[in-house]
């Protein structure tokens, strides 16, 4: 679950955070989700392009689904163990 949260955090950071050299009071390049991409050569970053972002998104979804499936499986096994467990009743 921590791995999935870390990947989602990295994906959100790459989508929203400004990057590149400082230009006045903020970075020169805007995040892909925040604003239009600049045609500037300094703003070209392999991790900020859509194919890489979609790959990170796919990795985040896979990690989230596997973590959720593991948690659900563990809870089902726990309930089955408590439901089918031995019942000790005193004899009369």
Image (cartoon, rainbow, N blue to C red):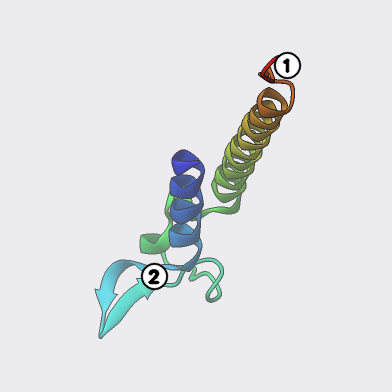
Q: Is residue 80 left or right of residue 68?
A: right
Q: Nearer the viewer, residue 42 or 2?
A: 2
Give residue 24's position: percent from left, percent from top.
25, 85
**Number of numbered discs on residues:** 2
In the rendered image, the residue lying farthest to the bottom is 25
Q: In this view, does 35 lie to the left or right of 40?
A: right
Q: Is 41 located above or below residue 57 in the figure?
A: below
Separation of disc 1 and disc 2 at Cα?
76 Å
Q: Nearer the viewer, residue 54 or 58?
A: 58
- Local crowd at mark 1 within 10 Å, few (<14), some, or many (≥20)? few
Per the image, label 2 sits on a secondary structure element best described as loop
Q: Is 23 located above or below residue 42 in the figure?
A: below
Q: Is 88 located above or below residue 22 in the figure?
A: above
Per the image, label 1 sits on a secondary structure element best described as loop
Q: Determine which residue is flagged by label 1.
A: 92
Give residue 51's position: percent from left, percent from top.
60, 46
Residue drawn at x 73%, y 28% is 83
Q: Is residue 87 left or right of residue 4?
A: right
Residue drawn at x 63%, y 43% is 61
Residue drawn at x 43%, y 60% is 13
Q: Which of 53 and 42 is in front in this view?
A: 53
Q: Which of 9 and 89 is in front in this view?
A: 89
The image quadrant that residue 85 belongs to is top right
Q: Which mark is residue 50?
A: none
Q: Which mark is residue 18?
A: 2
Comparing labels 1 and 2, the label whose residue is closer to the camera: 1
Quadrant assignment for the C terminus: top right
- Local crowd at mark 2 within 10 Å, few (<14), some, or many (≥20)? some
Of callouts 1 and 2, which one flags the residue occurring earlier in the amino acid sequence? 2
Q: Is 66 located above or below residue 64 in the figure?
A: above
């Amino acid at each position: 679950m921590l791995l999935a949260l870390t990947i989602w955090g990295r994906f959100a950071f790459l989508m929203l955070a400004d990057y590149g050299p400082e230009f006045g009071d903020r970075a020169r390049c805007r995040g892909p989700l925040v604003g239009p991409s600049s045609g500037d050569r300094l703003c070209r970053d392999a991790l900020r392009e859509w194919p890489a972002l979609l790959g990170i998104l796919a990795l985040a979804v896979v990690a989230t689904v596997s973590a959720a499936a593991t948690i659900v499986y563990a809870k089902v096994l726990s309930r089955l163990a408590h439901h089918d467990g031995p019942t000790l009743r005193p004899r009369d």
